[in-house]
Structures are given as C-alpha cells and as structure tokens.
Amino acid sequence: MAIEIFSRREQKYLITTTQYESLKEKLKHHMRNDQNGENGRYTVSSLYFDNAERDIYFETKNKLKYRQKLRLRVYGQIDPNGIAFFEVKQKHKNVVHKRRLTMPLSEAYRYLETDAYGALDEYDTSNPQVLREIDYFRRFYRLEPAMVVAYDRHAMHGLDDSNLRITFDFNLRCRKDELQLEKGPYGEHFIDPDLVIMEVKVDHSVPLWLVRILQELDCEQRSASKFCTSTELLSKGEFKKTDVEQTTLGGYSNGYDQ
C-alpha cells in the first residue's frame, strides 16, 4: 500500500546525460533500482492545477516559505479505470510534505466535474480525510486543470537506507490542451533533451558517500521547477523564463530551494 502522508527533504540537480551514466555506475554499489517499472524505469504523467490569476505559479516562482501544489498523477501505463494519485505537495522551510490518496482515475475525473460542495463520502478513495483537504484547497484557490507534465523516470533506493531515494527524470514534456491523462505522455519539451533532472530525497541529511560522489562528478544543486518551467513555456511569453539558479557542489544548499 502506498504511503499517503509523509515528509522529507529534496535536493534538485540539473545534470547532463553523461553525468547520469557516470553516476549510475558509481551508485550501483550503494543503491538498487526501484521495484516498480522495468529496472526502476517508468513514465510519470501529472495533471497540474492553477487558477486564472496563476497564484500557484507565483507562489512557487517567488519561493514563498510556505507553498503548495495540487496534482493528479499516474505512474506507468494509463488506464481510466486504473489507480491514480491525487496529492497536495507542500513545502515549508526546505521540507517537502505530501498528503495524497489513491482513487480510480475515472473517479478523480468524476470528482473534478462536480461543482457541488460536500458529499465527498460518495467517492471511491483510499483516504476520505485527504480528499476533504484537497477539496478545500481546490475551492479556496478556485483551482482548475492547467497542464499535463510527463517524463520518463529512473528511480533508485539505498541498499542500507531504504528511505534514501534518487530519481532521474528524462524527456520532459508538457501541454495545455487535451488534459485527459489517458491521451498519453506527449507534449513540448521544456528542458533540453540532453539534460536530466535528478532529485535526492532523504529523511534528514545526504550521506557523506553520496556527497563525495556528487562532488567528484561536479554535480551542481540547482533550482529546476517542472511546474514553473512548463507554465512559462506554455504561456508563450506571458511569463519570463525561469533562471536556473546555481548553488554549491555536492548537495550543500545555500538557501535556494524549489
């Protein structure tokens, strides 16, 4: 059963495919491929939400100390009757908090199509309390489906610490039409196909052996918001393109976060 409520620290890196290949070789002594997908590889498709004022975009872009996003996500092949993850991702003081539930994708669509308040108990969901929180967030911000973001992922877990997780995201694309996830993971590329977004996810601190590997391969921690970058690309010039912000080498943050 998927964990529905958890907190962790995340560090993002923008690396080249060459660095990825070198990292993958060095990490095999410390980490294993995720059990999902084929050798830890699968597609991630997400429907993101925002309002007419783009409040979620500006909260993220301006790096508010407390900010949150709403998204509907499917891993791997998409079946309208298959399982989807509906989640609120919150960030506060560099700690990521996730509150999510699972429900059939068709049931999530049914919920989104109704304007009626209350009556949430009628939906087939793994966590009615989280659905109430999602419903409050959605209505308070007047959120509507805004865009689909999809990418191919390679995920790994620590051999000695299963809570240590590293993900590599490739072939990142987005679209603002045909917002049904089952239409497929197609769209415009919003990051150079030769670049990879790497995320290091830990409960507390990055282990020293990993810091040394990242330093050895000159991996620089950088802000790389998929949500903001996709919004800016799809806005066709309405918003200024996000500047990629560099921090220090090997995972020591100087305060930038995304």
Image (cartoon, rainbow, N blue to C red):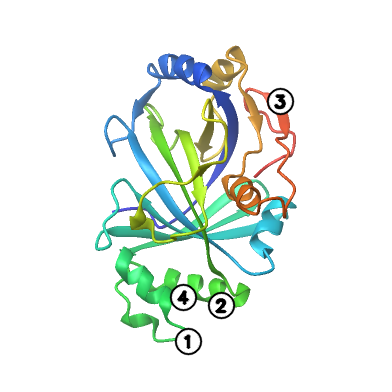
Query: Looking at the rendering, which quadrant does residue 34 occupy?
Result: top left
Instruction: Name the kind of residue labelled 3 in the image.
Output: Thr
Instruction: Name the kind of residue labelled 1 in the image.
Output: Tyr
Q: Earlier in the sequence, mark 3 or mark 2?
A: 2
Observer-nearest residue: 25 or 58? Answer: 58
Question: Does 200 appear above or below 228?
Answer: above
Observer-nearest residue: 228 or 211? Answer: 228
Residue 104 is at least partly visible in this image? no
Instruction: Name the kind of residue labelled 4 in the image.
Output: Arg
Tell me residue 131's x, y (percent): 43, 72
Query: Looking at the rendering, which quadrant does residue 1 occupy?
Result: bottom left
Q: Which mark is residue 132?
A: 4
Tell me residue 257's x, y (percent): 67, 42
Q: Earlier in the sequence, mark 3 or mark 1?
A: 1
Q: Which residue is mark 3?
A: 248
Q: Is residue 238 left or right of residue 224?
A: right
Residue drawn at 72 percent across, 34 percent down: 245
State the SS at label 3: strand
Tell me residue 167's x, y (percent): 45, 34
Report if the CB atoms under discs 3 and 2 are less than 8 Å apart: no
* Callout 2 crowding tier (Cα within 10 Å): few <14, some 14–19, many ≥20: few
Residue drawn at 75 percent across, 48 percent down: 240
Mark 3 vs mark 2, foreground winner is 2
Q: Which residue is mark 1?
A: 117
- Report the Cα–Cα distance between label 3 and label 2: 39 Å
